[in-house]
Each structure stands twice: as structure tokens, then as C-alpha cells.
Image: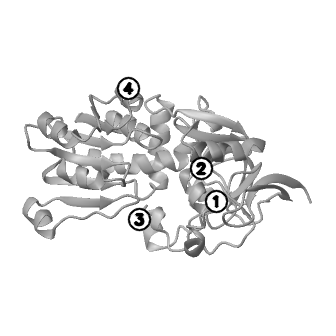
Amino acid sequence: MSTMRAVQVVGYNEALKMAEVPMPSATGPFDVVVRIGGAGVCRTDLHILEGQWAEKSQVHLPYTIGHENAGWVHEVGSAVTHVAPGDKVILHPLITCGLCRACRSGDDVHCEESQFPGIDTNGGYAEYLLTTARAVVRIDDSLEPADVAALADAGLTAYHAAAKAAKQLTARDTCVIIGAGGLGHIGIQVLRALTPARLVVVDRNEAALDLARDIGAHVGVLADGTQVEQVLALTDGKGAEALVDFVGEGGATAQGIAMLRRAGDYYVVGYGENIDVPTIDIVSAEINIIGNLVGSYNDLQDLMALAARGAVTLHTQKYALDDFQQAISDLDAGRVRGRAILVP
């Protein structure tokens, strides 16, 4: 039996370990084995190591993590026709059934039978990964797997929220984006591509605001304690029609709600704190608070079309698979600009 290298969780609050494990093979008709070209390192991976997902995922240790994956098709099951060995692909993070009500309506993120490589089954911090035909999206020849891997989850989450907001926005509207980091810098580009609305980005880092303006934001607002007043001043005291919050903690939610106009939409993406709003304020202003998970397979195809067109580019920092510990430490210490990618 052939083996491969894989980075595994061997215990919670313990360091990850490189191991030799059996190589996956395509045994089921819809199986696809992908040779990994890039695996994104995500803050969720840090939370997995802290044991935050142990209860939710019920995964058996040891197992391989990594849920943002792209590469080349290596082997396909007997019923797979839309991809062939050698094709460049990015992977939707979920393995879904295709048969439940959610899958039938294109809302595969809420599949009743889903598996989540890197969370509850083996993921992509490895040389090869087993997934399903339903998860592989062919990417344009101009794109490299290591450059787009983090669009599989971080990018897809940002796209999903931004596309929802864009459906409601017009050229007269203002959309505020809180946070221009790993997810935010993708959301800004997606919004710029999908809507004519004015984009106002709020961040506490001056360099992040410079990047935001470079990639399409119309206005940058420094979060120095006066950000609510600044946004109200920009909107004739009325507030923004939509707000996409990529932070969701450290007081961002109270400030976000205060920046919203009557009948405004508040899209929650980043998480960490509770949202505390008197119900009378929700009713009297008729505001909406909208949760956002990762996007669907269709969302990922749309995002890849934007990437192929050059409308969305990812800022990445690359590491060899052997340097997995360095990548994890750099992310934890806030030393990564954009997204960290492991390249086998």
C-alpha cells in the first residue's frame, strides 16, 4: 500500500505532528482523489487544536486537518465525468449527499448528511485528499492551486455574505465593511465587482485601510473610537443601508448596529461576542440581522469566475508542508498578511 505525508492532530492542546499515512484511493463511484497543490491555514485550525470543535465534530484522533484545498485531480471513481486526472480544481469544503432537501435546492451548505474534511474527516494538510465529485470545481488554467486555495473557505464565506448584500444594494446606497483582513480583503473585492454602491471600510489598522482603497473601497475610516460618528457624517446622519461585519468581536457589533440606517441589513460573518440590541430598536427601525456561513458550490463557481477575470486576487504567504508549525505560529502571532498557504 502506498503512503503519503500528512499533518495530524494527535491530541488537543498538543502540537501537530507529521505522519506517514495510507494514501486514499477512489473506491466509490463518485470519489475523487486530489493531489494537493495548496492548503490554507485558517484561524479555525487554531480553534481545532484548542479543542473548541471536539464536541461539535466528534472526530476520532489522530486525523489530518486542512479545510481550504486546491490541487490537481489524481484519480476518479467510475461515475465521475466532469473532471479527469490532471485537471486543476478547487474543492468546496463539504462532501455532500446531493439527495436531501437542502442539496436539491442548491443550498448544499446545509446538507443533512455532510462531511467536512479537515473538521470531522481527513483534510488537506497532506499530499493527497479524498473528496467527492460534488465538491470539485475546475479552475481556469491561468490560476494556480496554491494561489487560490484559501478562496475555498475564507473566500467562499466572504463571497456568500457579499453576494447577499449586493442583491439588495443600488448605486445610491452605502455599504460599510468592518475589517479588511483575511476575509475582509476578499469581501471588498467581491462587493466592488458585484455592486455600484459606495463601499466604506472601517479598520483599526492604517495599512489595512490603504490595501482596502487599493482594491476597490471608496472610503477608509480609521477605527479610533470615532468610527460611528465618521460613518454617520458620510451618510447625512442616516447610517448605511448595509453593513458586512468581518470582525464580530471586541465591540464591533454594537458599533456596527449604530452605523446602520432604518430598514438596514447587518450581515454577521466574524464571530466571538454576543449581539445585544433592545427588541424595540429592531422593531422601530425594522433592521435585519443576518447570519452567514460558508457559500454553496454555485457560489464557489461564481467566485472562481471572478478570480479568472482578475476581479478577486488573494494576498498569500506560502510555506512548505514541512514548515506547518511555523505557519501555525505565524498565524497565531498575527504575522500573516492575507492568508497562509501550505504547499506540499
Residue at mark 2 to residue at mark 4: CA–CA distance: 27 Å
Quarter where residue 97 is shown: bottom right
Q: Residues within 10 Å of mark 1 (few under 14, many from 20)?
A: many
Q: Which residue is mark 1?
A: 118
At numbered mark 1, what does the secondary structure look like: helix, strand or loop? loop
Nearer-the-camera pick, 325 or 161: 325
- Farthest front residue? 225
In the image, residue 27 above or below residue 33: below
Q: Tag 3 or tag 2, which sits nearer the N-term?
A: 2
Quarter where residue 12 is shown: bottom right
Residue at mark 2 to residue at mark 1: CA–CA distance: 8 Å
Q: Tag 1 or tag 2, which sits nearer the N-term?
A: 2
At numbered mark 4, what does the secondary structure look like: helix, strand or loop? helix
Residue at mark 1 to residue at mark 3: CA–CA distance: 25 Å
Nearer the camera: disc 1 or disc 3: 1
64 relative to 290 in the view: left or right: right
Residue 334: mark: none
Q: Tag 1 or tag 4, which sits nearer the N-term?
A: 1
Find residue 145 and report its horizontal and vertical position in percent: 64, 38
Q: Tag 4 or tag 3, which sits nearer the N-term?
A: 3
Q: Residues within 10 Å of mark 4 (few under 14, many from 20)?
A: some
Q: Residue at x 49, y 54 (%)?
A: 297
Quarter where residue 120 is shown: bottom right
Q: Which residue is mark 2?
A: 68
222 relative to 304 in the view: left or right: left
Asked if residue 321 can be seen in this view, the reply is yes
Mark 2 near mark 4, Cβ–Cβ under 8 Å?
no
Residue 105: mark: 3
Mark 2 near mark 3, Cβ–Cβ under 8 Å?
no
Nearer the camera: disc 2 or disc 4: 4
Nearer-the-camera pick, 291 or 260: 260
